[in-house]
Structure formats: structure tokens, C-alpha cells
């Protein structure tokens, strides 16, 4: 099926973004999808770093759904949906990275 490759590419893109975030906290994170998804959930979703102010955990659920298994319906609409979800997940990953970085900054010194 022609859309199966797109499904795999979208899933790989989301998995790579999740791996990159996990690697910020665990440098030697293995290249194992189950480990990456579980660590991403623990380190970024459960801690609310990846949770969006307006959309909650919606974007992380895209990764979790893809990890559970691909959509068995391969057509133009499902391919378009996956591309949109992958883009939203990657955008949310950038925001989560910025949020994580801000949390790593030492508190500003109190002025006397």
C-alpha cells in the first residue's frame, strides 16, 4: 500500500522527536521504541512538561496511538491526518524543549 510508508515515516518522526527529548535527561537512551515511549511518558507527559496550555495531552496521544499500532485504513485522508499529527507533535516537542530548558535555569538572584 502506498500510504504505509507514510505511516512509518510519520511514526518515525514522532519517535525521533520523543527520543531527542528523552536524551536531554538520559544521554544513553537506547534506540528501542518501547523504552523511548515509556520514558517520554514518564519524563515529559507525567511531569506536565509536554502538556499544552490549551490542548492538554492531545499531542502526546498522537505518539501513543501510533506506537500502539498503525491505522489499518490506508487512504489519502488517513495519510493527511498522520502528517498533521506528526507536525503537531514535533511543534509541541519544540515547545516542551523550551519549557524544559527554562526549568533548568537557576532562579534569578534576589535583588536586595
Image: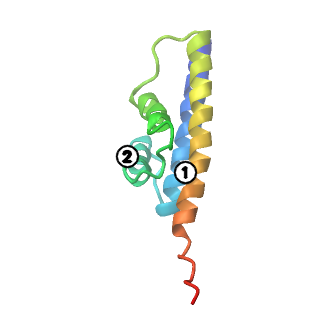
Q: Is residue 55 above or below residue 102?
A: above
Label total for image: 2
Q: Residue furthest bottom?
A: 112
Q: Residue furthest front?
A: 112
x and y, in percent, of residue 2 in the image: 62, 13
x and y, in percent, of residue 71 in the image: 46, 18
SS of the residue at dot 1? helix
x and y, in percent, of residue 108 in the image: 57, 78
Q: Residue at x 47, y 52 (%)?
A: 49
2 or 1: mark nearer the eye? 1
The earlier-in-sequence mark between 2 and 1 is 2
Q: Is residue 57 above or below residue 99?
A: above
Q: Residue at x 39, y 42 (%)?
A: 34
SS of the residue at dot 2? helix
How packed is label 2: few (under 14 Cα within 10 Å), some, or many (20 or more)?
Answer: some
Q: Are marks 2 and 1 in contact (CB under 8 Å)?
A: no
What colouring style does the render use? rainbow
Image quarter hosting the C terminus: bottom right
Image quarter hosting the N terminus: top right
Front residue of this view, candidates 1 and 7: 7
Q: What's the distance in space between the residues labelled 2 and 1, CA to CA?
A: 17 Å
Q: Is residue 75 above or below residue 60?
A: above
Describe residue 73's horizontal placement relative to residue 83 as left or right.
left
Q: Is residue 40 visible?
A: yes
x and y, in percent, of residue 56 in the image: 45, 39
Mark 2 = which residue? 38
Q: Is residue 27 visible?
A: no
Mark 1 = which residue? 96
Amino acid at each position: 500500500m502506498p500510504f504505509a510508508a507514510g505511516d512509518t515515516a510519520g511514526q518515525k518522526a514522532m519517535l525521533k522527536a520523543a527520543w531527542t527529548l528523552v536524551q536531554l535527561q538520559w544521554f544513553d537512551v537506547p534506540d528501542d521504541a518501547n523504552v523511548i515511549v515509556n520514558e517520554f511518558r514518564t519524563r515529559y507527559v507525567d511531569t506536565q512538561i509536554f502538556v499544552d496550555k490549551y490542548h492538554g495531552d492531545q499531542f502526546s496521544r498522537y505518539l501513543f496511538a501510533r506506537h500502539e499500532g498503525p491505522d489499518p485504513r490506508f487512504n489519502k485522508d488517513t495519510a493527511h491526518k498522520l502528517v498533521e499529527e506528526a507536525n503537531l507533535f514535533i511543534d509541541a516537542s519544540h515547545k516542551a524543549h523550551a519549557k524544559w530548558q527554562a526549568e533548568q535555569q537557576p532562579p534569578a538572584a534576589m535583588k536586595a
